[in-house]
Amino acid sequence: MGGNGSVASATEVYGSIKPANDSLGTLYFTDYQSDASQVNVTLHPESNIICQISSANNYDKVQIDGLLSYSNRTEDFDTSEKMPYLSIELTDTMLTVNDEFVLLTATEKSGTDWGFNIIYPKAYTWVTEERQDSSGSYMVVAKVTSLDYSGQGDIEIGGDEDNTFQGYPNDDWSYDITDNTPLRTYADILGKKIGVAAASYRYDCSRNDGETGLVGNQFNIIVGENEMKFDATEPNKNSFNYGGSDAIVWVASRFNQEVRGHTLAWHSQVPEWVSQDGKKNNHNYTRQELLSILKNHIFNVVGKYKGKIVEWDVCNEVLDDDQSIVRTNPDAYKLRPSIWATYIGEDFIDSAFVWAHQADPQAKLYINDYGVEFMGGTKSEAYYNLVKRLIKSGIPIEGCGLQCHLTTGELDTLKLEKNIKRYAEIGMKCIITELDIALANPYSTDALERQAKEYGAITRVFLRNDNCPTMLIWGISDNHSWRQNQPLLYNSSLKPKPAYYNVHAQLRIAANRVTSVEKPSSLDELSIKEIRFYNMTGQLTTNPSGLVIKQTIYTNGTVITTKEIK
Ligand code: XIL
């Protein structure tokens, strides 16, 4: 919501409100039709009120002619503990000590057990006070207490509680840019898989540099962005094409990586001979015929890569976007109409898993979907219900994938982590399969920084949950992404972005917590190329003393990082 004006009915704020779009303004929550009635406003954990200040007298205001309250029943089921945000933004302005700004007023604030998370500008030092005026009205007042900047603008949005590592500010990736250890080295130390979607047709997979070099050198697992989908592998009935999928497997074998298979039963990217749009049965197949089409496909493709593909997304995006059914029936879920769901029935899922398991009993089998990331969302609840149903039916399922196609501002690490943890409780892995975070405001000066923080926060969730062994990013560089607005780790010139450095920093911080690392036996003293020391703030030092980080770089490119007291 943004603009100058008024809102006139009981209002719930789930996202951001900004009194004016471009300039300054006042947003009134007032009912002009009836003097008596008030407009009550409820804020939620994600609510963000953004007020801009341009001078001592000129600034945004929010005026609520009614009760201001807070609810953490963000969606029907959730109880996030996060408090709403109040962000103060400055346009270039000169303020003086004791300048005061009444940013928000309401006739009353309901409940005392909540307050705002204040996001201060990165200039001056501020206090914010909740006050009542003589008539008892509630207000939030921001005041400048010093012209020096005290660092209080560094609050992280995202509900992430892990700020415990001593020595590194959690998100200060600038310390990290001297360290060119690949992501996968730290992931290996941690026993984690950090992956990327590779695209054999977008760049030259036979090279060892460029995109392929980044895909191969930085990550220890890859997935074909399109190469293993039904239309790619079986473009004509019972005629299989493994050109693209072989290229992916070839890259992985050259770079010693694992491969994920994506995907076997999906409503999208199916060839015309199966269905013209993935939903219609325009060839009038019988249920039996469709079952044999799916079975033949799965046996061929999974069988072809038996022992080479460690895990498969067996079913992709089977859930309907509308899961309002869970509001009345909390254990329910609704399937999306597809050639498989509509003309076979729900048991196409069960059969697909069983066939994939028969074709390669070692392969780990996953279900995968989007919009299921955050606990409390109706689709997330439906997903959980479906996974529980599959377990109950004895289906060989290893876990579920959260695609995580996000836009900055959407990440709620608390709800994400709660979601991942509840899968652990039912014995399921829960992995991040297709992460990308598009910029909500690509032209704002801190867009890349904000994106980096969210990448960092999600990496920390991944690292601290054992049932989340894998995190894959959906593409390598912004120019090759399927989405707009620069969602990936590398820019179009293949330069690492702040997001890369923050993912790197989080992996490095976690890996450095692992105090002793076993050296692979092929590495001996003779093959050491270089030893580097970093101090605990991450700076390269030639004069190590006290607790330092030691990087041993071997001639074969392996980098082992340990902590040492000098
Ligand atoms: C996307 C690819 O990235 C695009 O290149 C293609 O045109 C369409 O599919 N969910 C999935 C992925 O499971 O397979 C999709 O990949 C993105 C959404």
Image (cartoon, helix red, strand yellow):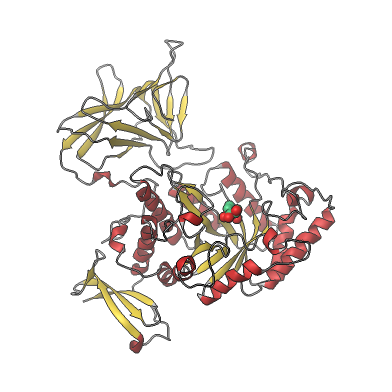
Report x, y in % for residue 563.
29, 73
- Is 182 located above or below residue 413 in the figure? below
The answer, for residue 469, to whether it is visible in the render is: no
Q: How many marks?
A: 0
The quarter of the image that holds ligand 1 is bottom right
Q: To which quarter of the image does residue 513 belong?
A: bottom left
Q: Could you tell me residue 206's position as x and y percent?
A: 54, 72
Quadrant of residue 347 within the rendered picture: bottom right
State the image quarter where residue 50 is shown. top left
Q: Quadrant of the C terminus?
A: bottom left
The answer to whether residue 50 shows anywhere in this view is yes
Q: Residue at x 30, y 32 (%)?
A: 52
Q: Quadrant of the image for the N terminus?
A: top left
Q: Position of residue 420 (x, y in %)?
A: 51, 54
Of residues 443 and 470, the one drawn nearer to the viewer in this rendering: 443
Residue visible at 36% across and 66% down in the picture: 508
